[in-house]
Image (tube, rainbow, N blue to C red):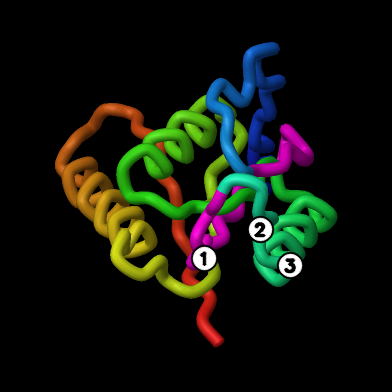
Amino acid sequence: MSEAKPGISKAKPSPEYPPEDGHYLRGNDYSPVAVVVMHNAPREEGKETPPEIEKLVKVAIETGAALAGTLQTANIGLEKLITNVVANTNIRFLILCGKEVDGHKSGDALIALIKDASMRNESSSAPTLRLLIYLISR
C-alpha cells in the first residue's frame, strides 16, 4: 500500500506584499518561482531599461513566476530582493540570469549569500527557508 504524499500548501501573501518598491513585475502569487535578471546597464533618470532585459522580466511573469525583476546593486538591491522574496512564503526557487553587473558584482554577492546561508543551516535543526538558485548561462 502506498502512502499519499501531502501536497505543498499555498498561502495567500499579505495585502502589503511585496513590501519593497523596485524594478519588478508581480505575477502569480502562488508560484514557487522568482526570477532575477541582472541589470548591467546604467540606470539613469528618464532612461528605460534595455529592451532585452525588460523582455526577460516580462517572459518570466507571462510563464508563471511570482515575481520577476532586475538587480543592479549588491547592497540596497539585494536587501529589497530578499525582503520581497521572503514576504511570499510560496517562493522556493530563485532563477538568476543575465550578465553580471560590472563593478557591483551583485550576482556573485547573491550566490555567496545563499551558499553561506545554506552551509550555516545544514547544522541546524530549526526550520529554515531554503532557496535554490538555478544559474543559466549562454
Residue 9, numbered label: none
**How many numbered circles does the render carry?**
3
Q: Seen in the image, is 76 located left or right of residue 113?
A: right
Q: Residue furthest bottom?
A: 138
Do tag 3 and tag 1 residues touch (Cβ < 8 Å)?
no
Q: Seen in the image, is 80 located left or right of residue 138?
A: left
Q: Quadrant of the C terminus?
A: bottom right
Q: Say whether residue 48 is magenta.
A: no
User: In the rendered image, which quarter is residue 101 located in?
Assistant: bottom left
Where residue 94 appears, x then y in whole percent?
52, 53
Which mark sits nearer the N-terminus, 1 or 2? 1
Do tag 1 and tag 2 residues touch (Cβ < 8 Å)?
yes
Q: Which residue is mark 1?
A: 41
Disc 1 secondary structure class: loop
User: Depth check: 1 or 123 in front?
Assistant: 123
Which mark sits nearer the N-terminus, 3 or 1? 1
Instruction: Categorize mark 3 by other alpha carbons within 10 Å: few (<14), some (14-19), many (20+).
Output: few
Residue 51, numbered label: 3
Name the amino acid type tagged 3: Pro
Name the amino acid type tagged 1: Ala
Q: Which residue is mark 2?
A: 49
Residue stretch in magenta: 24-44
User: Depth check: 15 or 1 in front?
Assistant: 15
11 above or below 92?
above
131 above or below 129?
below
Where residue 91 appears, x then y in whole percent?
58, 40
Q: Seen in the image, is 31 located left or right of residue 62?
A: left
